[in-house]
Amino acid sequence: MASKLYKKILIATDGSEYTKNAVDYGIEFAKNTGAKLHAIYVVDTAAFASIPMDAAWESMYELLRQEGDEATKYVADRAATEGLEVERNTVEGHPADEIIKYAEKNATSLIVMGTLGKSGLDRFLLGSVAEKVVRTSKIPVLVVRGKK
């Protein structure tokens, strides 16, 4: 049954074990609503802004791009088991900003993402991509806790 409410679902992944539960939710949502699936991985270039460009940086950057390819491939492979296709994307920038920008540009109906479930000092010091997306997105966001 196709939904009029959900046309496109964006699954934001960082490739970690924590996001696998969110991937499952996003795929199930798409399967039940007939929505098209998109997967995004953001290479956090802000983390490297103060590091001079050299061979080590280039090597790290390539590793992150590869991690992004593997993360979105995981989403596509899981979706394929349900007969769904996924448009895969790896972008660069600040994760929360890029997820929202991509969702808005592509007229996404729902953003699905995982959370590490951090609290207290960790959350204060590191911030939370999911929290920033929830606070600033005009598009509905489904945040799924990882399996313990």
Image: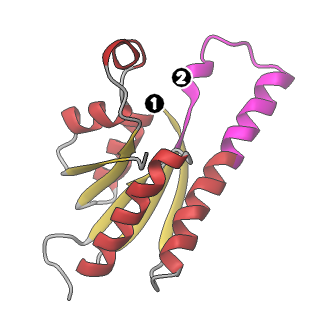
Left or right: where does residue 99 sit relative to residue 1? Answer: right
Q: Does residue 85 sit above or below 37 in this rendering?
A: below
Where, by quadrant of the figure, is residue 122 drawn? top left
Residue sitting at x 28%, y 32%: 131
In this rendering, the answer to whether 115 lies above or below 81 is above
The structure residue drawn at horizontal position 57% and vertical position 28%, both measured from the top left corner, is 45
Labelled pair 1, 2 in contact (Cβ < 8 Å):
yes
Q: Amino acid at mark 1?
A: His
Residue located farthest toward the front when viewing the structure as drawn = 148
Image coordinates of residue 23 in percent, x first then y, are: 43, 60
Which element is circle 1 on? loop
Pick the front one: 135 or 32: 32
In the rendered structure, which segment of residues is drawn in magenta? 42-66
- Pick the front one: 70 or 56: 70
**Relative vertical location of residue 5 with respect to residue 148 in this rendering, above or below:** below
Give the residue at x 30% y 53%: 111
Quadrant including the N terminus: bottom left
Q: Earlier in the sequence, mark 1 or mark 2?
A: 2
**Which of 59 and 19 lies nearest the eye of the viewer?**
19
Return the residue at label 1: 94
Give the x, y percent position of residue 38.
42, 64
Look at label 2 and name its amino acid. Ala
Quadrant location of the C terminus in the rendered image = top left
- Callout 2 crowding tier (Cα within 10 Å): few <14, some 14–19, many ≥20: few
Give 37 or 98, whichever is nearer the viewer.
Answer: 37
Most common secondary structure along the magenta stretch: helix
Q: Which mark is residue 46?
A: 2
Residue 52, quarter of picture: top right
* Secondary element at tag 2: helix
Residue 30 in percent (x, y) is at 32, 74
